[in-house]
Amino acid sequence: MRFRHIISLTCAALLLSVMSCNAQSDRSRWRLGTEWGYSVAFFNHYHYCYPDPDIGYRVDDEQYVNIDYLGAYWLICGGYDISERFNASLGVGSMGIYDKRIVIPVVADVNWLPKGVGCDGPIVTLGGGVAVNSPRHKPIVLARTGAGYRFALSNWADLDFILRFRASLDHPRVWDADGGRYIDESVVLRNDALYFAVSLGMVLSF
């Protein structure tokens, strides 16, 4: 599995970084790294509105549903240390939003590290972005926030553990259970689906 390969490469990188803890080179403001982890989607609010293709009357369906979906995500990230305590980053990769919905996200984050970007200490993060899985579908809007802890492995390598809350606004195709088909998107008046999830991830940056 690809996540096993990612973990193996990360462990190798960690070993190299620990061996380099005594390096005296200056820390670069530009950062490059990878983020990966797992998320659990636990709640869904959806609102669909469309004319029934057989009868012609308007269907307006809105529900709040408890769900249980475990998904993985992985990002390649580039960032910049704006100041001694703030960092901005941009990531792209793969993310599981919910069942059969694996997307390509582009996410920007602003991170606050009260003890300094190059020091052990807490980290608070706020970000958002968009995700796509097909040119035919509307982009998914993402928002996420969380907190965690940074381990400064060396003068140039950091490892973050972050617990996040994530909201994802999607516009999926509407399934007509009675007719056993998807509703033609040209007649759909509303197809909003909001998913809430929590994630636990690791960020390794150099």
Image (cartoon, rainbow, N blue to C red):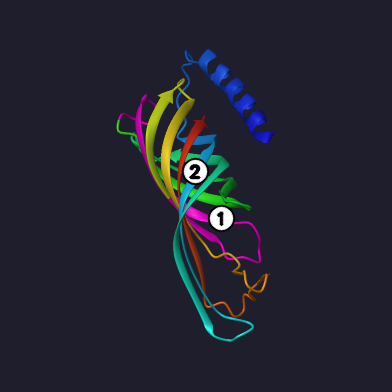
Which of the pair 134/71 is nearer the observer?
A: 71
- Residue type at mark 2 is Val
Q: Give how far across and how far down residue 20 sits, in percent.
A: 52, 15
Residue 111 in view here: no
Q: Within 10 angstroms of label 2, few (less than 14), some, or many (20 or more) residues? A: many
Quadrant location of the N terminus? top right
According to the picture, the residue beneath numbered tag 1 turns out to be 131
Residue 38 in view here: yes
Q: Give how far across and how far down residue 51 sits, in percent.
A: 56, 82
Q: Residue furthest left?
A: 114
Q: Residue furthest front?
A: 178
According to the picture, the residue beneath numbered tag 2 turns out to be 40
Look at the image and give the residue range highlighted in magenta: 115-143
Q: Is residue 116 magenta?
A: yes
Q: Is residue 47 magenta?
A: no
Q: Earlier in the sequence, mark 2 or mark 1?
A: 2
Relative to 182, is 163 on the left or the right? left
Q: Is residue 206 above or below residue 107?
A: above
Q: Give how far across and how far down residue 168 sits, in percent.
A: 48, 55
Q: Secondary structure at mark 2?
A: strand
Residue sitting at x 30%, y 33%: 114
- Residue type at mark 1 is Ala
Relative to 149, is 75 on the left or the right? right
Residue sitting at x 48%, y 15%: 21
Determine the CA span between mark 2 and mark 1: 18 Å
Q: Is residue 99 above or below residue 55?
A: above
Residue sitting at x 44%, y 31%: 161
Q: Give how far across and how far down residue 48 sits, in percent.
A: 51, 71
